Image (cartoon, rainbow, N blue to C red):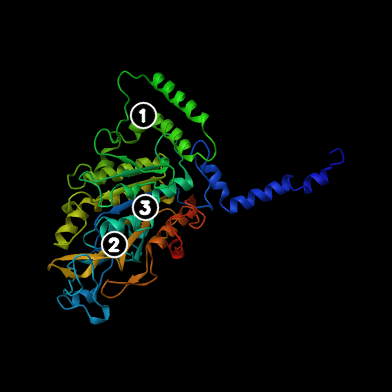
Amino acid sequence: MNNFNRRDFLTHPMGPCGSLALSWLLSQEGFAASIEANNLNPLAPRRSHFPSKAKSVIFMFMVGGPSQIDLFDPKPELNRLNGQPLPPSFGKPVSQFTKGDTPILGSTRKFQKHGKSGLEVSDLMPNLAQCVDDICFLRSCWCTSTVHAPAMYEMHSGRTLMGHPSLGSWVSYGLGSTNENLPAYCVLLQPEGTPEGGAPCWSNAYLPAVYQGTLLRRGANPLLHLKPPADITPSRQRATIDFIKQMNEKDLDPSRTDLAARIASYELAFRMQSHAPEAVDLSKESERTKNNYGLNDKKTSDFGTRCLLARRLVERGVRFVQLYSGGGPLVTQWDAHDDINSNHEKMCGHVDQPIAALLKDLKARGLLDSTLVVWASEFGRLPNTQGGRGRDHNPHGFTMWIAGGGVKGGQTIGATDEMGLNAIDTRISVNDFHATLLHLLGMDHEKLIYPHLGKDERLTDVAGRVVQSVFA
């Protein structure tokens, strides 16, 4: 070693140049992210694959399947052929309850152009219509199931079967959290009940348990068991947590991600007792803000509360917030089998004002650029009737939209045919949709992987393309 000079050191395989090259290669292959995921804090913030504007997500899910042709995708030809059979060229779209042989049902809704972009929105969403210049409408989405639960699993996890991690879990796993005192992934359900898909819609599946969605419930105590028993002092509880951590760490090795997640969960639960009550306390919001979100109106108060909570959570560094409109009994969902107008008038009445308030509030606070807002559902509705006034499920072509977080607003992407039945231009599969959302967050969907049962699993499975025209 006495003859080992500086030139030898710099050219040696284990010298700094070799180490730098090795580090770069590892990061390119995705190993750096997996090393970070195995540290003692699985929720520590992580570098994205490339720079991005979006840092957090508010994912709004409309349970039951809103009708694209009554909301965001006007079809004059549908109205002209109202009451007639579907033209033979369209085939017979078999759905869950219809066989494609019922007559066409035109839309009675009035569409108008709005904003500088002139995008059309129906009279069911007058408040949201004021925000179209910030919204990108994806009119050519499609999925693979006509049944609620499998379609929900596909939209949440990329597969029609339960047992795979949800989008929120993948995002939390890939990026961690910037707030160590709150969950990275929060779920806000409708008080009447859960969607048909249930808990698998926000499950971590085979990802470590720390990436599962945390339910926030209605009322003064949105998080169950947040307050310790009256006879347990903070110092006593801190001592208990420290002792549990010490015992767990005796068995900890880099491969024990489950144990690392357990340690992190205990620590997070302890910190949440001090910080979560403030995050979910709406009492300090101004009366003007509460009115904007509709908290003082019985029709909009439930969903408005969830929208306002979502803003407060992303404002405090929560990575992913998933909130639902619809759940529980059929009458509280967007599932308009009997009467499309009465159902959508009711459901849009719940969400239109709060969603518009959320977009405007995020924009006014400078948060819209860093927050990706998503409006989605498991599928749309058919152009032909069910029972005279309702519509059955349509997975072949429907509309979802995104805003903020690097999205080019004021545009529509893709199109359905003249009946609003099939996506025909720039078709966007669920895998494409997920790949695009991850890209907006700075993640390459082909590199965001997790080893499971001998396979490198990913949200988009073996498919997915990024819809480039989405980006600003």
State the residue in front, 56 or 252.
252
Mark 3 and mark 2 residues within 8 Å of each other at the beta carbon:
no
Name the N-terminal-most of marks 1 and 2: 1
Name the N-terminal-most of marks 3 and 2: 3
Image location (x, y in percent) of residue 318? 40, 42
Query: Which amino acid is tagged 1?
Result: Gln
Report the residue marked by disc 1: 273
Question: Of the numbered discs in the image, which one, if any, rests on residue 221?
Answer: none
Image location (x, y in percent) of residue 393? 24, 64
Report the residue marked by disc 3: 373
Report the residue marked by disc 2: 379
Q: Disc 3 and disc 1: Cα gap in Å?
A: 28 Å
Disc 3 element: strand
Image location (x, y in percent) of residue 96? 22, 65
Q: Residue at x 59, y 54 (%)?
A: 28
Query: Which amino acid is tagged 2?
Result: Phe
Q: Residue at x 40, y 50 (%)?
A: 165
- Residue lying at the far front of the rendered structure: 453
Query: Which amino acid is tagged 3?
Result: Val
Front of the two marks 3 and 1: 1
State the residue in front, 245 or 51.
245
**Mark 3 Cα shell of 10 Å, populated few (<14), some (14-19), many (≥20):** many
